[in-house]
Amino acid sequence: MRRALELARGVWGTTHPNPMVGAVVVEEGKIVGEGATAPDGGPHAERLALLARGKTPRPGAVLYVTLEPCSTEGRTGACTDAIIAAGIKTVIVGAIDPNPAHAGRGLEVLRAAGIEVISGVLEAECRDLNLIFNHWITAGTPLFAAKTATTLDGRIACRTGDSRWITGAAARADVMRWRRLFPAIAVGAGTLLHDNPRLTSRIEGREEWCPVRFVFDGLLRTVTDRNLPKVYTDEFKQRTIVVTTGHGGMGYVRKLKDMGVNVWVLPSDTQRVRWGEFRRKCAEERIAGIYIEGGAQLLSQLLRDAQIDYLFSYHAPIILGDDRAKPMMSGLRTEKLAQAVRLDDVRHDVLGSDTLLRGRVVYPDKLFADETVFSLG
């Protein structure tokens, strides 16, 4: 199963909106076929592993797969049909399909065909592998994941604005890895103007990769400067989408489009865009997850509106001890611990001298509302 997980991680960020899955065929204790999910529309891991075997597996062959085999036809055919046809008699499964319409059905189909099925092997690792897909398939909306990098006392910059670099090289390299996983990255106008980030994944030994790059800019103030941000002028500019409203000025919208930059003008009576509209548009475009890198204003708005689904929180062994240093997030009035926002399914990683704490965000009931909005720019 660990080898199957390794294969799945080998297609990191290339399968959206489908999950990353790895599969291996084992005969007499030796791996004789391997496969990992192809890009959207291509064959699934189980079919590729069976194909790699090259011939009918021997009696007693075992299939290990990180996610429950699909049992519906889809575009590539049900994997359960391929497993049954191949004569596999034992299937070892990591995680169950999170889709409520399918969860457990693939296992039932295999067992009905006389196949021994064992599930839950390295389940936590297999489930965590597809945190974007799990949210997408169960909630029907993209995963909004916020990323922060703070001192031990929760500050993202000195009172002067100095913030480079709070975390070390290992943590920054890890951010690049997560940028490669998510199909989209988002920043606010303030971050774009202050830091002028490239918003690409740059991993040593690999070609630079650019996800969809969202810029939230309700007044289109990032377009007025003569020195336009990199994301509007570089070789990946067609991957940039500026999210705004009709109040930002249609002349600037035309300017962006003439430069080859995409613009989403979402309906709103003010410069405040409804989160539901943005989520709906992302879902229409099949953008399953957005890695939101702030800054503090945007992340605070997300937190107040209970819109952060997942949090990546990097911590450096630094203490500023200054109440005027910039906090990671603000705007809530938390008078009791029972009212605090918490993380669930928490995972920890040590990255050089820094640490990463990440998990699913759980809000107290008082934060939820029927309809929430956020201010762009």
Image (cartoon, rainbow, N blue to C red):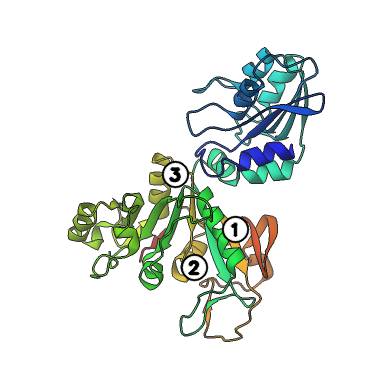
Q: Is residue 372 visible?
A: no
Whether tag 3 and tag 2 are in contact, CB under 8 A, the answer is no
Above/below status of 293 relative to 51: below
Residue 72, by quadrant, is: top right
Q: Is residue 243 visible?
A: yes
Crowding around mark 3 (Cα neighbors within 10 Å: few <14, some 14 to 19, many 20+) is many
Query: Which residue is at 58% across, 20% downward?
Result: 78
Q: Residue 234's x, y, as percent?
A: 32, 57
Above/below status of 122 relative to 224: above
Disc 2/disc 1 C-alpha distance (Å): 18 Å
**Which amino acid type corresponds to the residue marked 3 in the rendered image?**
Ile
Q: Residue 38's x, y, as percent?
A: 53, 32
Q: Residue 37's x, y, as percent?
A: 57, 33
Q: Quadrant of the C terminus?
A: bottom left
From the image, tell me which residue sits under label 2.
300
From the image, tell me which residue sits under label 1.
365
Give whichever of discs 1 and 3 has the lower sequence position: 3
- Check disc 3 and report its element: helix, strand or loop: loop
Give whichever of discs 2 and 1 has the lower sequence position: 2
Residue 358, by quadrant, is: bottom right
From the image, tell me which residue sits under label 3.
287
- Check disc 2 and report its element: helix, strand or loop: helix
**Which amino acid type corresponds to the residue marked 1 in the rendered image?**
Asp
Crowding around mark 2 (Cα neighbors within 10 Å: few <14, some 14 to 19, many 20+) is many
